Image (tube, grey):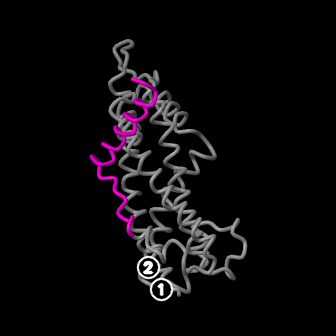
Amino acid sequence: MTDKEIIAEFNNLVARKVKEFGLKEDADKIKSDPFFIGEKAKDSRLDFNITTDIGFIHSDLIFTTGLLFALKPYINNPLKETVFLKGKEYSTYRQNMYDSFYSMYASVCFEKLYNFWDRIGDKIANEFPKRFPNPKRVMFANVIDNLKDEFETNENFKWLIDFRNRDFKDFNDKRKSVVHYEQIETKYKESILENTGNMEKIKEIFLEKSTLPEFFKGHIGLSNVGIEKTYAFVKNMT
């Protein structure tokens, strides 16, 4: 096979996993709506770019999560990679190539998911230029916090408030750990080696690591709803 054919097969593999695990872009119709892409926004050029970003980032998140599902069966399982010493079982961590890729792309998923909600914040802030005069200081959380008192009774915005305080906060705490403190590979390698003789703890650590694709699948579902709620909220602002 040529390099080009290998790349095409790789893309087909991920596409199959996206379909198999139901990683759907349910909000595609909304993202192509003339209103949503910026024709009626207060700053239509900026809004068009923001919405274009939302579409690309959303697709990237889905693709990368599909890749995690493809890699998952082949990552290191410390419960099956053990040695016996003086009658006691100890886990090991000799990372393979698939595990390395899995960790790498899990980090990418964290970045893509944060970028997605960052652009959703930009999308909302673009309708309130006086409240958010500096685009460089706009983030999803501070946009929601700035507007929550005014729009807490709005059904669509209330969903965004609830999401910001629960699922987004939980996700962002995990992201901050990866981005600012230690890579996913470092985190799990350290945890496994520190608990090498405690197989119950190893089981817990591996469960957390091996369910990252499901974690991001859940957030893809939330991102689809988030697009719908943002669209409905912003549209009613005009």
Residue kind at label 2, given as amino acid type: Ala
Tag 1 residue: 236
Q: Secondary structure at mark 2?
A: helix
Looking at the image, do the residues carrying marks 2 and 1 touch, with CB atoms under 8 Å apart?
Answer: yes
The residue drawn where x is 41% and y is 38% is 205
| Camera-side residue of 46 and 230 | 46
| Camera-side residue of 86 and 217 | 217
Q: Residues within 10 Å of mark 1 (few under 14, many from 20)?
A: few
| Camera-side residue of 50 and 227 | 50
Find residue 66 and report its horizontal and vertical position in percent: 38, 44
Find residue 154 and report its horizontal and vertical position in percent: 45, 85
Q: How many marks?
A: 2
45 sits left or right of 3 in the view: right
Q: Is residue 130 above or below residue 226?
A: below
The residue drawn where x is 40% and y is 40% is 67
Residue kind at label 1, given as amino acid type: Asn
Looking at the image, which residue sits at the far right? 134
Quadrant of the image occupied by residue 199:
top left
Magenta-drawn segment: 1-29
Tag 2 residue: 232
The residue drawn where x is 51% and y is 71% is 37
Q: Is residue 42 above or below residue 111?
A: below
In reply to whether residue 192 is colored magenta, the answer given is no
Find residue 182 and report its horizontal and vertical position in percent: 59, 40
